[in-house]
């Protein structure tokens, strides 16, 4: 059996908010430890008792990536795989077992199952690395985004087999622990948003990523930055940081990784 440690970053989440995700994680025989990283002052998490659960109080609201990094640095060397999990994920143990069984036979660093809404609709968690136009059109020009999303969201991807994909969504990232440690986890310059794109990209380049759509998890996704001006500001700031780091319109690394993915889709 492969050992998996899972990390959850919480911020003002009630127990009822987190209960479906906790129950999914704790029900899996493959998961040995579940780390609750508290970015606030939870009135329940430090009192929650379960043999698998470890509570970790961060110095404050340090952000998504920095919160997970606290867990990664302390625990990742104790497991074969390390799971970055959002607090709004639901899955059956059978689905996770399928993903882990597949990953244990591969050498790549990052694995993602099919991400779906509660009604079963595909969330398209497997994506190309975004251009500035992809991100800003999706937020401010839905008509343009609809045209671009056909390629960006890999809507023609074969869902009956695994595929190399450069950007795997951060809501449920299963890493080979050694790869995650070598990558040094998330880039902590991102407070929230884009940190998953950055880490997924680095892993794709160094170790390889695999999208495994034969297993699936449910993501109760709310698109907070579409509803909250503060979150929108954070999203825009992170996008600015990301493109400043990797390149806005001239990004040879993005082209190389995206082309590798597209060539396999188009059988070139």
Image: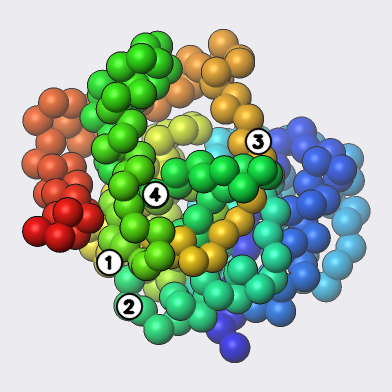
Callout 2: helix, strand or loop? loop
Q: Is residue 256 above or below residue 147?
A: below
Q: How busy is the neighbourhood of tag 4: few (under 14 within 10 Å), some, or many (20 plus)? A: many
Say which residue label 3 marks: 60
**Contact check, label 2 and label 1, Cβ < 8 Å:** yes
First-in-chain label (2 vs 1)? 2
Give the residue number, with chain letter if any, for mark 1.
207
Q: Earlier in the sequence, mark 4 or mark 1?
A: 4
Q: Nearer the viewer, mark 3 or mark 1?
A: 1
Q: Earlier in the sequence, mark 3 or mark 4?
A: 3
Which residue occupies 39% across, 27% down? Answer: 238
Q: Residue 101 at x, y = what percent? A: 51, 80
Q: Is residue 165 above or below residue 224?
A: below
Tell us which disc is closer to us: 3 or 4: 4
The residue at which mark 2 appears reads as 107
Q: Is residue 31 above or below residue 142?
A: below
**Cα gap from disc 3 to disc 4, whole angstroms:** 31 Å
User: Residue at 31% across / 62% down in the picture?
Assistant: 163
Question: Disc 2 to disc 1, how far (Cα)?
Answer: 8 Å
N-term mark: 4 or 2: 2
Query: Mark 3 or mark 1: which comes first in sequence?
Result: 3
Task: Specify the label residue 130 is tagged with.
Answer: none
Residue 199 shown left or right of residue 100 in the figure: left
């Amino acid at each position: 059996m492969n050992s998996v440690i899972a990390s959850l970053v919480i911020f003002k989440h009630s127990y009822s908010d987190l209960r479906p995700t906790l129950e999914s994680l704790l029900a899996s025989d493959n998961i040995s430890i579940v780390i609750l990283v508290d970015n606030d002052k939870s009135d329940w998490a430090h009192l929650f008792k379960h043999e698998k659960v470890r509570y970790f109080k961060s110095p404050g609201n340090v952000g998504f990536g920095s919160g997970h990094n606290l867990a990664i640095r302390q625990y990742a060397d104790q497991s074969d795989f390390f799971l970055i999990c959002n607090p709004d994920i639901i899955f059956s143990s059978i689905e996770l077992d399928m993903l882990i069984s597949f990953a244990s036979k591969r050498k790549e660093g990052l694995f993602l199952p099919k991400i779906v809404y509660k009604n079963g609709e595909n969330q398209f968690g497997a994506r190309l690395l975004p251009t500035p136009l992809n991100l800003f059109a999706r937020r401010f020009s839905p008509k343009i985004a609809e045209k671009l999303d056909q390629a960006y969201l890999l809507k023609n991807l074969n869902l009956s087999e695994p595929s190399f994909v450069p950007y795997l969504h951060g809501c449920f990232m299963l890493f080979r622990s050694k790869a995650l440690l070598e990558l040094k986890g998330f880039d902590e310059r991102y407070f929230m948003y884009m940190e998953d794109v950055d880490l997924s990209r680095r892993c794709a380049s160094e170790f390889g990523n695999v999208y495994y759509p034969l297993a699936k998890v449910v993501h109760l996704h709310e698109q907070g930055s579409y509803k909250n001006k503060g979150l929108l500001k954070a999203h825009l700031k992170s996008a600015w940081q990301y493109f400043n780091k990797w390149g806005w319109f001239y990004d040879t690394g993005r082209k190389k990784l995206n082309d590798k993915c597209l060539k396999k889709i188009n059988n070139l």
